[in-house]
Amino acid sequence: MKDTAVKRDWLFLPVHKIDDLVLRKATKRAYWKGGKVNLTVRQFDLVDLLFSHRGTDISSRKLYDTFRGRPGLLAGNGPEGYRVNLRVVIMHIRKTFKAIDPAFDEIETFAGFGYRWK
């Protein structure tokens, strides 16, 4: 029996790298300044959305719909309750990046509207 090399497809998947951020979309992995960012799959989706539209303000509603995977889902107290939930998720994402780089400040808040990646 001949030894055959196992092709590791994940090695050849597209990698999106700009500046200090590397996004491996197929495996939902993110790296910041060489360190692995321990994000959940949903958090990764938010980072991907923000980063893909860097410099553009994205509404809290659009971000929350991406996070939950269900457009228009009501959560929290009243029709705007989802904003509080999203704020907590963004806080956790920032904290995760800051564990690698205490100076991380790429996610900006646009009060009353949403967020953006610088």
Image (spheres, helix red, strand yellow):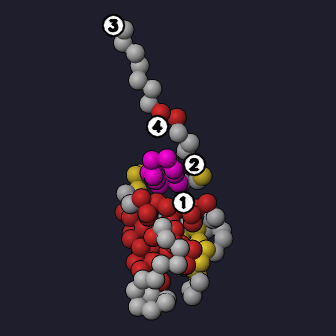
In the rendered image, the quadrant that contains the N terminus is top left
Q: Which of marks 4 and 3 is nearer the N terminus?
A: 3
Q: Nearer the viewer, residue 48 or 101?
A: 48
The residue under label 1 is: 48
> What's the amino acid at mark 4?
Trp
Q: Which of 11 and 66 is in front in this view?
A: 66
Distance from Cα at disc 4 to Cα at disc 3? 26 Å
What residue sits 66% from the left and 71% below the top? 56
Q: How crowded is mark 1: few (under 14 residues within 10 Å), some or many (20 or more)?
A: some
Question: Viewed as shown, does residue 93 lie left or right of 105?
Answer: left
The residue under label 4 is: 10
Find out whether the residues at labels 3 and 1 contact each other: C-beta distance under 8 Å. no
SS label for mark 1:
helix
Which residue is outermost to the top? 1
Number of numbered discs on residues: 4
* Residue 86 visible in rendering: yes
Find out whether the residues at labels 4 and 1 contact each other: C-beta distance under 8 Å. no
What residue sits 56% from the left and 42% below the top? 14
Residue range corresponding to the magenta coloring: 21-33
- Nearer the observer: mark 4 or 2; the answer is 4
Q: Earlier in the sequence, mark 4 or mark 1?
A: 4
Q: Earlier in the sequence, mark 1 or mark 2?
A: 2
Which residue is outermost to the left? 1
Distance from Cα at disc 2 to Cα at disc 3? 39 Å
> What's the amino acid at mark 2?
His
* Residue 84 visible in rendering: no
What residue sits 43% from the left and 63% below the top? 42
The residue under label 2 is: 16
> What's the amino acid at mark 3?
Met
The residue under label 3 is: 1
Distance from Cα at disc 1 to Cα at disc 2? 10 Å
Find out whether the residues at labels 1 and 2 contact each other: C-beta distance under 8 Å. no
